[in-house]
Amino acid sequence: MNDKNGLAITLFGEILMVDQLARSRLSKALPKGMELSHFSVLNHLDRAQDERSPAQLAHTFHLTRGAMTNTLHKLEMAGYVHIRPDWDDARRKMVAISPAGRQARDAALAGMAPIITEIVARLGEARVRSVLPILRELRLKLDEEI
């Protein structure tokens, strides 16, 4: 194994471990019954401030339509999203966050904020800001491959 392969393997090993640890810590801070995937969809819908189709959401999160349908079903059963037929194409559906979904998202953020704030404080704001452009570029490069 050459140095370039070793560097790449080390980089992705660290990213995967950070992902695993972050998911574990943040999952524990979520309201009872909420999963990170649920929070991610609610957060996306809240920030978008518009409806999305299940296909659009699946594409955004790089999931299969079946996986997104499963997540949306759970969110709908919890009352966190409204799913309606698309008025232009009855075969499609449209998804919007509900007021209860917005409250659940806000509660999730309130639970996660102290963890995230503490980590940023321990690392230092300047160091976190310095790594963000690299992580964004890495995300965009990986997204090009899909």
Image: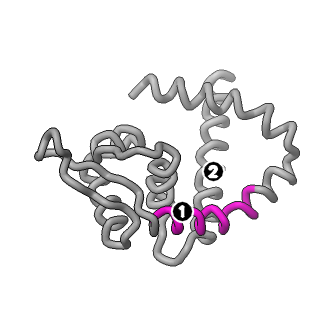
Q: Dot 2 corresponds to which residue?
A: 17
Residue at figure coordinates x 40%, y 39% from the top left: 60
Q: How far apart are marks 1 and 2 (CA)?
A: 25 Å
Instruction: Say what amino acid the circle numbered 1 marks.
Output: Arg
Closer to the camera in the image, 60 or 14: 60
Q: Is residue 87 magenta?
A: no
Q: Where is residue 19 in the image (x, y as percent from the top left)?
A: 60, 50
Instruction: Say what amino acid the circle numbered 2 marks.
Output: Met
Nearest to N terminus: mark 1 or mark 2 = 2
Image quarter where the N terminus lies is top right
Q: Is the magenta stretch mostly helix, strand or loop?
A: helix
Residue at figure coordinates x 26%, y 47% from the top left: 65
> How would you rate the neighbour count of disc 1 (Cα within 10 Å): few for under 14, some for 14-19, many for 20 or more?
many
Which label is found at residue 105? 1
Residue at figure coordinates x 66%, y 36% from the top left: 10
Which label is found at residue 46? none
Q: Where is residue 35 in the image (x, y as percent from the top left)?
A: 48, 65
Residue at figure coordinates x 32%, y 60% from the top left: 82
Q: Is residue 112 magenta?
A: yes
Closer to the camera in the image, 49 or 66: 49
Q: Is residue 78 above or below residue 94?
A: below
Q: Is mark 2 on a helix, strand or loop?
A: helix
- Quadrant of the rendered image containing residue 140: top right
Image quarter where the C terminus lies is top left
Q: Where is residue 5 in the image (x, y as percent from the top left)?
A: 61, 26
Relative horizontal placement of residue 43, taking residue 123 as reference (left or right): left
- Quadrant of the rendered image containing residue 100: bottom left
Over which residues does the magenta segment extend?
Answer: 101-116
Q: Position of residue 44 (x, y in %)?
A: 48, 48
- Quadrant of the rendered image containing residue 97: bottom left
